[in-house]
Amino acid sequence: MRFEDIYKSNYVAGYITEEASNKEPFIGEAFFPNDRTFGLSIDWLRQTLGVNMMLNVSNLDAQPKIRTREGFKTENTEMAFFRESMHVRERDMLMLATAESQNNPYVRQAMAHAFDDVSKLVDAADIAIESMRMQLLATDAGTPKISLGTVDNTIYTYNYDPDGSWKTAHYTSLTGTSAWDKSDTATPLDDINNAKKSLRKLGFTPAYALMTSNTFNYLLKSSQIKAALVNVMGTAVTYVNETIVKDVFRQNTGLSIILYDKVYKDYSGAEKQFFKDDVVTILGADRVGTTWFGVTPEERTLIGNSAVDVTVLDRGVAIAVKTIAGPPVKILTTVSQMAIPSYEGMDGVYVLNVNGD
């Protein structure tokens, strides 16, 4: 990338797309694929399969009984708006010009990376989306909700289970001797199978158990897992590794384990995992929702404005770059997105807090 290119939104948009293949993927996109929409909110249908009822008996020549249609519940959610800017000042421009004139490729590369504002902001936009997805899958004490913080005394929280009915049927907190950190008494295989049974009763077929490596370590130490290994190998086992435990887990539960340890920094600069420790989420192989992207003010009003360089990524993130003549002269880069996940398949998800003490 040349220095002049870091000020061009369309070049950086292509660069970001190309570089994405070199990064650890966001798991959330597999379960909440991206889509576009218009407006400030979304209407979505919550799938509630449930157990079907047998067909009613009837007399010949009689009118059939009308069955009430079930299986869907309409929800409405307002989209969240994200926007942030970075700017290059006159001193920064002079530093870039000096580096441009040098023959040292390492200096040039380092300077280009340091001032690649667009890439940093687009990465931050992706982080915000993945954080929302994982807040739904990992839940807050059993309540699937998204908390984005407070702006100008407005608290941005989206509760996907306002009446608590989902938590009652789809969440278990394991405490005392049942907690997974109690390796001698915990029964993780039973816990998973009980949760799986609950989903199957509702008509859903689970396929995966999503957790962090720290949570997976409980399974490595579990007496029940080691006992299950004896049945497979025919002898006592003193040491187990990730591959062996994943295989035994799959044989005894029918689920494949997904480990997700990707981290980010929150608004305070503290490092956090997208998916929380001590949580196991059981879900199917299909999508459980959709990540909806709306139209931002930058996309709606600034495209076609010669004073602002605007590019919109396929998923809906808008990149706007503007040179302000000043004085002082500066280049302002703004990235914005209007987005929210829908959670149509939430009733096909079960969450375990495996260390609820």
Image (cartoon, rainbow, N blue to C red):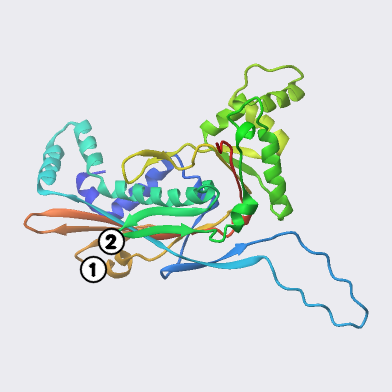
Amino acid at dot 1 = Asn
Q: Kindly identify the residue that appears in the image at 40 percent across and 39 percent down.
A: 272
> Mark 1–mark 2 contact, CB under 8 Å?
yes
Regarding residue 315, the answer to whether it shows in the image is no
Amino acid under label 2? Val
Q: How many marks?
A: 2
Q: Position of residue 146 (x, y in %)?
A: 45, 54
Image location (x, y in percent) of residue 57: 89, 72
Tell me which corner region of the image, top left, top right, bottom left or bottom right, holds residue 82: bottom left
Q: Secondary structure at mark 2?
A: strand
Find the residue positioned furthest to the right: 60
Tell me the residue at 46%/59% (across/down): 158
Q: Disc 1 marks which residue?
A: 305
Answer with left or right where residue 323 lies relative to residue 342.
Answer: left
- Quadrant in the picture for the N terminus: top left
Q: CA distance from mark 1 to mark 2?
A: 8 Å
Q: Which residue is mark 2?
A: 310
